[in-house]
Every structure is written in C-alpha cells, then in structure tokens.
Amino acid sequence: MKKKPVLTLALAAGLAVSSIGAQAIYAKPVDVQQQQPINVFDNKVINKINVDNIYNNIEYLSRTPRVAGTAEEQNAIQYVKEQFESYGYKTELQEFQFYGYTSPTTVELNVEGYEGDLEPKSFTYGMNGNVTGELVYAGLGQASDLEGLDLTGKIALVQRGNISFAEKVLNAAAKGAEGVIIYNNADGVINGTLGGPNDAYVPVVSITQAAGQALLSAIGNGESPIATINIEGAEAGMRTSHNVIATKAPTNKNKGTTEEVVAIGAHHDSVPGAPGANDDASGTSMTLELARVLKDLPTDKELRFITFGAEELGLIGSRYYASQLSEEDKNRFVGYFNLDMVGSRDAGHLVINTVDGQDNIVSSHSQASSARLNGEPTPIELGGSSDHVSFYEVGIPSASFIHRPLEPWYHTPEDTIDKISKEKLQDVAEIVGTAVYDLVSPENQGPKAVKGNEQKVPHLYHEQEIK
C-alpha cells in the first residue's frame, strides 16, 4: 500500500476538550535527512499485519454500544480475552468497581400555556421524579439570587452561568424547590452533568435559550405558569468492569534479557447510544492485531497488551490499573502506546498526543518509524482525555495516537463500521508496531526504562472514585 505523506503543519484541536491545539513538534531523532530507510526489523512487523483482522474485529465489537458496566461491555471483554488467548497469550481480567449512572428513558417537561416543543434534556446524575409547581424565575441560581425567594413547592427557572449545574440545583432545593429548569445562555442545547451523585438533588431538566426566554417573558408579564417535570428510568449505583491484560515474557533469555516492560493498549467501552466503531473498537482491534503480530517475534522485554474498561467515564479502568502497579513495576516500564480512534475515514491526519506536549521515548520512536515509513515524522500535540494520561500520572512515558480534527460522528450513533478506513488502520498499525518492535527487539538493544515524576493531572479527565 502506498503511503500518503503525513501532516506537515500543526493541527487544530478536535472535539475532545483537553486537546488544546498546541503547536506540533518534531523530535530531534527524526531528522528526515539522516533517517535510515525501512529496515529488515520493520519488515518483520509490516509483513505480518493483516488489516482485515483489525477491520473484522471492529465490525464485531461495534454491533452494539459497549457502555461500561453493562452486559454489552462484558461481552466485549470476553471477546477480547478469547482473542488474546487464541493467539496463545496468558490473559487475565482485572476487576474494578465504580459508581455508574444510566440515563433516564423518559424526560418530559410541560408548561401550561406554552405551545412550543420544549425539548428538555436530562443531566448526568440527575434523579427520577414527577413534580408539578408554579414556575418562578431564580436568576442564575446563586445564593444571592435566591435571597428572599420562597421556592417551597415550586419549580425554579434558572439561567446557565457563573456556578455549576449542581450548585444551582442544590441552592434551589435548599429553598424548597420541587424541581429546576436550567435554560442555556447561548444557542444550542445543554448536554450537562451534575458531576456526581447527591441525595439532595431534585428533578432537573435543561432547555434552550429561546425556550427559557419565552418562559421568562411569561413570568415577566405577570403570569404564573404551572410546570411539570417527569423523569423516569435513571439508574445509579456501583458497577463492575474489567481490564483485559495479555502478557508476553521476554523470549531472548540468553542475550541481555531485561525485565523491562513495553505496553500497548486501548479502551473497549463506548458512550451510550454509540456503537463506537472508531471510538474505540478501532484501538482495541489494533491492539489485538499487534498482539498477534508480535507474539512469535523475538523480544528482550516483557510486552503487555491491555484493553481498559470505563475510559469514557473518566479513564477509570486505566487509572485503576496504574494504581495497582508496584513501585518496582513502574520502574520497569519503558513506555505505553495508547490507541484511541485510529481508523475514521472522516477524521484528519494522524497526530501523537502527549500529556505535556513534549517528546518522550514513545513519541520519539513513533516519529522515527513514521519518518522511515512515510517520509516525515508524525507531529506531536498536547492532548489528554485518554488512557495515556493514567500512565503519565505515575511517571511512565506515554503517548496516544489519534487523527485530528475528529470526525463529525464522534460520540454519536453514526460512529459505525462503514466510516472506517483500512488505509488509516494500516498506517497506524505499521507506525506503532515498528516503533514498539524497535524498543523490544533483541537486535536493536532499545533504551532502558527511565521513570518520570509522578504528578496528578485531573483536569484532563473527570475525577471519579474507583475501587
């Protein structure tokens, strides 16, 4: 397959909130003028990659959404485990628990006298309830806005802004409100979260700016409209998920065998309603294929292939995995290669995300591979919001591979198999596969593990307790 040159300019960030469009950088080791052509060690990997295997596994995994803690995610976990085992790997399931939330099946809002469609939306961690009361304007829902207001038995209409959605709901509830309607302060809908569970919440829905202003006008005209909020089917509680870990011990036991570790991974869960073909059945399936490719090649380091659960809820699976590593284990890690959204035909060019936007052993070896294969190095960008963050936090060099800008189907029901590009899959598999083999091949004598500083970066994911 003829390679297309990769991006030569920095890319703007896509839809993921933590990728802030830092200028792309190129590592020193990948000066194209000095770069060696594809070598025999690259071909050992490239010649074994079968892109149809990746595509077919994506097709199987993306037949249904794989929301963390559901039976569908468990089916995906078992499938991944069986695939690893079919290649001959020793495989384990690492169980963890987390607080899970299922969105409601019914979200209704009716206001007497309002003839339009209010199109209410729910908030993550919102509670069920059927409440009716007089609609009262409560400003931004701040404590100062509610001074002198008696909301007992009423429904508060508040505007988005200044404080969190959760604070607005709790402030109104403390004043006796039966429910809360939050209207947007800009065009569009609110897809919001209350951030976590709280027994003090009352039923809450969001509406558009236009709908909110119409209701506010009715109140301003002296009307006292009666509103009813009905939310059904929301469920919350402790859920169980698993990480799937396949391990390959060093095979070159007589020539400088080390106890160092290189890992490749992806997340196997998806968001509600999204089949997740690209996000992230593509990364999971590529992890499986690289495990198959590297299984019988000589290596002088331990290889781990990991798929993580509950990434979409705040990197919960990978954070749990990292939290369970001993100091000895962390010191053995050379690096972690993360594959997240690596096959969409509708996304932009391949970039390498690092948490600090700086080069590390994972990005530099990957840039060297892409320079050999494609004629120029894949650019590095600052970016979080995926499982490489969890490794960075415990001092393990890591990077994530993704195409930017993101495809328009990101986190939607349209993230389906027909949007997957085999050419992009082949390209990323070759870059990552040859970079990894460059680190673990006995002939290449890759660099020793160097542990970085441990540091928390919770702004790059939604913090949530794990057990």
Image: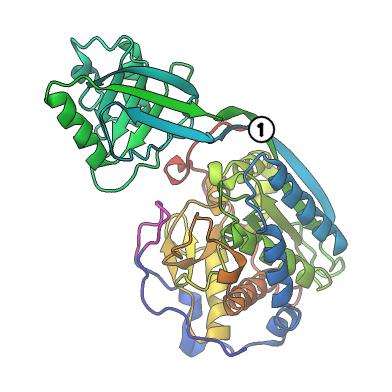
Q: Main secondary structure of the magenta part?
A: loop
230 or 204, which is in the foreground?
A: 230
Q: Between 159 and 37, which is closer to the camera in this rendering?
A: 159
Residue 136 in the image: state x and y as whole percent: 23, 20
Q: The N terminus lies in which quarter of the figure?
A: bottom right
Q: Is residue 276 above or below residue 393?
A: below
Question: Can you give x and y, in whole percent of width and height, for residue 334 in the image?
Answer: 64, 59
Foreground residue, 451 or 147?
147
Q: Residue at x 84, y 72 (%)?
A: 296
Secondary structure at numbered mark 1: strand
Q: Is residue 392 above or below residue 399?
A: above
Q: Which residues are magenta?
A: 13-22
* Quarter occupied by residue 398: bottom right
16 falls in the magenta region: yes
Would you call the spot at circle 1 few (<14 residues within 10 Å), some (14-19), or many (20 or more)? some
Q: Is residue 238 left or right of residue 29?
A: right
Q: Does the image show residue 117? A: yes
Residue at the spot of label 1: 239
Q: Position of residue 347 (x, y in %)?
A: 47, 70
